[in-house]
């Protein structure tokens, strides 16, 4: 399995080992554009792997803070109560960079930046850049992807 993420198309494509497309999903990358630097709020480019999968068996719309479920389920009322929260929901695929000096170690480390592929509230549009650096997906889509990919799956993020 291999994941390609196109920033230009705002699309994630899952391919099998022969290159056959297994699934495609609309995504939302960073509102700040692309970049690998810490605290940039940008989506990092280049070769990555899925370092960890978090949230298996959690209900749809489970709220995560610090990669831990809070016990909350995201609702419009909860979103109104915490309007500034960056909603990380349902499942987390935590990415780690593979390219030293580009997206791994030092000031450009994707994993240390806590860059994920994760679910987002159903009321939040996907298909255009709007995240804080992560790759956002619809909740039903992240569950499907989560169930198809193992830890170690390669992820290429390209413009």
Image: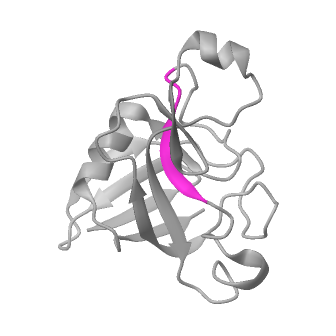
Q: Position of residue 25 (x, y in %)?
A: 38, 43
In the depicted structure, whether residue 59 falls above or below residue 154: above
Quarter of the figure with the N terminus: bottom left
Whether residue 10 is visible, yes or no, is no
Residue that lies at the very extreme toward the right in this rendered image? 39
Residue that lies at the very extreme toward the top in this rendered image? 77
| Left/right of residue 53 with respect to residue 136 in the rendered view | left
| Left/right of residue 8 with respect to residue 90 in the rendered view | right
| Left/right of residue 54 with respect to residue 121 in the rendered view | left
Colour setup of the view: one colour
Q: Position of residue 159 (x, y in %)?
A: 60, 62
In the depicted structure, whether residue 107 falls above or below residue 148: below
Between 97 and 17, the one lying in front of the other is 97
Query: Is residue 113 one of those drawn in magenta?
Result: no
| Left/right of residue 66 with respect to residue 85 in the rendered view | left
Q: Position of residue 116 (x, y in %)?
A: 54, 55
In the depicted structure, whether residue 63 falls above or below residue 22: above
Q: Residue at x 32, y 41 (%)?
A: 143
What's the magenta region?
115-122
Q: Residue at x 57, y 27 (%)?
A: 125
Count of marks placed on residues: 0
Residue that lies at the very extreme toward the front in this rendered image? 71
Residue that lies at the very extreme toward the bottom in this rendered image? 100
In the depicted structure, whether residue 100 falls above or below residue 82: below
Whether residue 153 is visible, yes or no, is yes
Answer with the quarter of the image where residue 149 lies. bottom left
Q: Residue at x 65, y 42 (%)?
A: 129
Q: Position of residue 34 (x, y in %)?
A: 71, 60
Dominant secondary-structure state across the stretch colored magenta:
strand
Query: Is residue 117 one of those drawn in magenta?
Result: yes
């Amino acid at each position: 399995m291999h994941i390609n993420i196109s920033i230009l198309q705002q699309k994630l494509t899952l391919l099998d080992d022969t290159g056959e497309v297994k699934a495609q999903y609309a995504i939302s990358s960073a509102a700040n554009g692309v970049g690998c630097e810490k605290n940039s709020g940008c989506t990092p480019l280049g070769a990555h792997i899925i370092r960890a999968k978090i949230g298996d068996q959690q209900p749809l719309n489970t709220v995560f803070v610090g990669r831990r479920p809070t016990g909350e389920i995201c609702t419009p009322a909860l979103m109104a109560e915490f309007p500034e929260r960056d909603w990380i929901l349902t499942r987390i695929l935590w990415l780690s960079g593979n390219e030293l000096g580009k997206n791994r170690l030092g000031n450009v480390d994707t994993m240390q930046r806590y860059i994920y592929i994760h679910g987002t509230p159903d009321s939040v549009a996907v298909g255009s850049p709007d995240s804080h650096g992560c790759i956002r997906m619809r909740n039903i889509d992240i569950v499907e992807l989560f169930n198809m990919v193992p830890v170690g799956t390669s992820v290429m993020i390209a413009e």
